[in-house]
Image: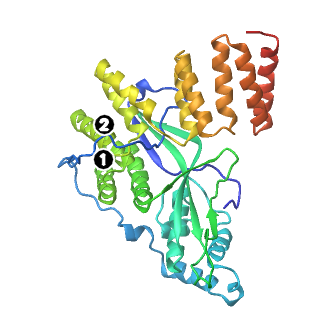
Amino acid sequence: MHTQPIIKAIGLVTMLAGLGACQTSNPNTPVVSSQHESLSKVSLNWRSSLFSPREVASVDDIFQLTVKQKNDFNTYYFAERNAHIEGHERLYNYLEMILYGFDYKGDTYKASDALSKHSGNCLSLAIVTTALANLVDLDVRYQRVNTAPIYQRFHNVMTLSSHVRSHVFAPETPLKKNEIVVARKKMIIDYFPEKGNVRGDFLNKSQFLSMYYQNLAGDSLVAKDYDLTYALLAKAMEISSEDPETLNTLAVLYKKLGDLAKAEQIYDYSLNNTSGSVNILSNYAMLLTEQNRQEELSTLQEKLMSIEDDNPYRWYDIANQHFDKDELFKALRYFKRSIKAAPYLHEGYFGLAKTYYQLGRVKSAKQNMDKAVELAFTPKDKVLYQAKLKVLAVKKD
């Protein structure tokens, strides 16, 4: 849903710490999945008595609406003038109507707060959508959307923002004789649709709920309210004790408090007993670098090669890190991974072009620059690439 110009799209927050080893403008922090490396379950002792108890919202609180908010929606939804419109479209139309002038800033709110404040990020919008859908028994699914990432640094903590959207499905109806439903109709609620967005994986309910607590934990970690951070992460762990991003933020919390042994225990557990995360690989690598444990660091970095990730921008970020370090063959490898994930985006081809040029392979550089020009979305990108093509045109391999 796009009702007005957007300030920025912010959703899932992933925390990184120890930025001395990661000062490029495009750090590699994707959310990924990989095969479990251990079939046996290992118990993780993640709790600590260091923190004072803090009260946080329950899952029910997240989707609770005020009486007025419920009545306003029900009045619209069940109005006779809207009876001819299917339920999922009615919900979409209502959101489009009430979200005019909505401030899409980066705060994560419960449903009632997002509506009363007329503000909130994309996760807040998905929460509002779910709260309304629950009132009329509409099914909702959530999908991660891969965009060019937004990074913010706060002291030695960095946040990475990505995007989530909701799919609201049409009400189920009894099937007629000999009728088969191939796919249910749906509306996609997304306030930040762009050409460069790439559809990512669907999230299960636990993943979606964990995102709420992860976001707030990220905010409180930046604010150095560590008791609240711990309480929020404990709630996320109740929902899903194997969510890699919850575990990653928990490890960052312990690392900031100086408990490196506990942080390493969490990193190691996550890599060997969950679906994995390049965030954890990156942060674990920072810890090993700081301790000059080079042999373990080399082994850890090799794991990156086997990880699958559907976000092309993440591989593009990793490739640029290697390019900036003059590790050109590694840069080529990851630019190619970016293109494999999304062959219709221009950035990966531009990355290949500049890398091949540095390697002296001008013909290959020109071929990829041609492709980047062809796929460029904006006139600014197209002009930039065409200018570089003119330079390549007078050179030969």
Of all residues shown, which one is farthest toward the left? 49
Looking at the image, is 263 positioned above or below residue 127? above
Q: Tell me the residue at 70%/34% (across/down).
A: 346
Q: Which mark is residue 263?
A: none
For badge 1, the amino acid type reads Tyr
Determine which quarter of the picture holds residue 19: top left
Q: Position of residue 20 (x, y in %)?
A: 41, 25
Instruction: Quadrant for the C terminus, please.
Output: top right
Please tell me which of labels 1 and 2 falls first in the chain. 1
Q: Position of residue 269 (x, y in %)?
A: 27, 41
**Which of the two residues, 333 or 134, is positioned nearer the viewer here?**
333
Specify few, some or many for label 2: CA neighbours under 10 Å numbering under 14, 14-19, or 20 or more.
some
Tell me if I can see residue 224 in this picture. no
Q: Tell me the residue at 66%/74% (across/down).
A: 89
- Disc 1 is placed on an element classified as helix
Q: Which residue is mark 2?
A: 256
For badge 2, the amino acid type reads Lys
Q: Which residue is mark 1?
A: 226
Determine which quarter of the picture holds residue 176: bottom right
